[in-house]
Image (cartoon, rainbow, N blue to C red):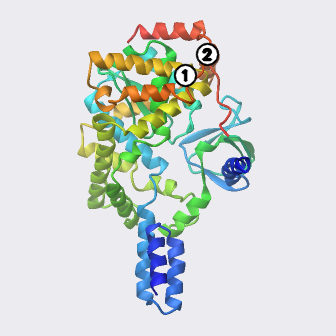
Amino acid sequence: MKKAMLLILFLVPALCFAGETVKVKVQRSSLFEQPNFFSKTVGTLQFGEELETEEVVKDWVKVKFGRQRGFIHQSALTSTKVDMKTMMFSGSSSSGPSQDEVALAGKGFNPEVEKNHGKAHPEMNYALVDEIERYSVDPNSLRSFIQKGGLKVSEGQK
Amino acid sequence: MKTILLIVLVLLLAGCATATQVATSVGVSAGYMTGEQKQALDKTAVKVEKATRPVSETEEYYIGRGVAAMILTRYNLYRNPAVTAYMNHVGNTVVLGSPRPYIYGGYHFAVLDTDEVNAFACPGGTLFVTKGMLKVVSNEDQLAAVLSHEVGHVAEKHGLQAISSARWTEVVTTLATETAKSYTPAEMSSLVDLFQGTVDDVFRTLVVNGYGREQELQADGLAIGCMKTCGYDGRQFVSLLDRLEQTSKQAPGGIFATHPDLSERIRAAKGPGAAAAKPPAPEERMMRFKKTALSW
């Protein structure tokens, strides 16, 4: 009985993504050939882009994006089922990427609010935050760092 | 009648607008309420549902940028390219072993130029470690322990839990009522004030009051799991806590003011699920730590 419950617990999240339309909820994410952070990149996905899911492999989702197929980590995705609900109650158009994430990218706490916040509070140095965010680690450099340090990469938690 | 009202009330409190609309329709059909009453209840249901929605990924990002900017009003940024590169390599390694490796703007690691022993995880993924904390860690695995713990706070959205529910309700209600594409000066002023209040809520918890006991223990558990996934020696997490406890006796304040009960955390980290013994770290890992540590 316990095993059956565990199986259901593991299967339900996986099934939530299989065979549905999902959206990218991060600024950008690579589309990988294999379900692995250091697999060959077959494309780059941007915030709000819609993908068709085909298969779930541990923490990775195989998706179709136009003519491309590849894997994206589940933490970079959101289900559009939630979006439809949000749109229905917010009265926004059903065309385009108008789920709450996307809507809030244009409204709510956004660059415009941050700009005005910076003007009202000149002591807040957003330029320094930009400087911190500009630093990015090259994936090849990170892979080498991990390998040389005798470390390993997660293959998923489910 | 009482039953219908009770159902509507329960659904309203649950923030379930669709179900409330169904229930009110039944109420009107059965003659228990007027069309106007139905309309008012439906509107309230939508308002309640909106007001109870969680903070979105993009909102988390902008709130986190505000918190980071506020932290940088109190501390100076330590600019050393070698240290920044090393921190971001260790940090991004542990991120890959975390339950939430992808967040809207990605994770970024920076050092604060102060001898105070501390570390801060801003929502949205900007993580700060002080030079004082770097002086406490004695190897890369212990640095990974500090960063894993902070990544754990982000993964579990602990910073966002500091936002007062009354303020968040006001934020969501304000956003829900504004339909124009751009804001009037008054609307923008109101949003800026709410944004400042939200940032203040998170800042106070991160810098002044500290997280709750449960949140710290949860971040510790995630950190040990994350270290294990990445191949770091989880026992170094306990060694780090031991070193912090020793340091707290010599230099109180900073993290010791906001994380008072280190002994309980040490007991928990040594308890069930404690990390198993591992062979010593490879030479390369030890050497790159020693080389970079010369700069801090």
Label 1 with label 2: CB-CB less than 8 Å: yes
Residue B280 is situated, as x and y percent measured from the top left of the image, at: 59, 10
Q: Position of residue A108 (x, y in %)?
A: 40, 55
Query: Looking at the image, is mark 1 or mark 2 earlier in the sequence?
Result: 1
Could you tell me residue A151's position as x and y percent? 62, 19
Q: Quadrant of the C terminus of chain B?
A: top left
Q: Which residue is mark 1?
A: B234
- Residue closer to the observer: A118 or B255: B255
Q: Which residue is painted at 41% across and 25% down in the image?
A: B110
Q: Is residue A35 above or below residue B1?
A: above
Secondary structure under tag 2 reads loop
List the residue tagged with mark 2.
Answer: B278
Q: Amino acid at mark 2?
A: Lys
Chain designation of label 1: B
Residue at the bottom extreme of this rendering:
B31
Q: Position of residue B41 (x, y in %)?
A: 42, 78
Mark 1 to mark 2 CA distance (whole Å): 9 Å
Of the pair B129 and A89, the residue shown nearer to us: B129
Residue B140 visible in the shown view: yes
Q: Amino acid at mark 1?
A: Gly
Tell me which residue sits at (30%, 34%) in the image: B207
In the rendered structure, the answer to whether residue B229 lies left or right of residue B17 reads right
Residue A125 visible, this orientation = no
Please state if A128 lies on the left or on the right of B95 as rendered.
left
Answer few, some or many: residues within 10 Å of disc 2's Cα (few below 14, many 20 plus, some between 14 and 19).
few
What residue do we see at 59% from left, 31% from top?
Answer: B97
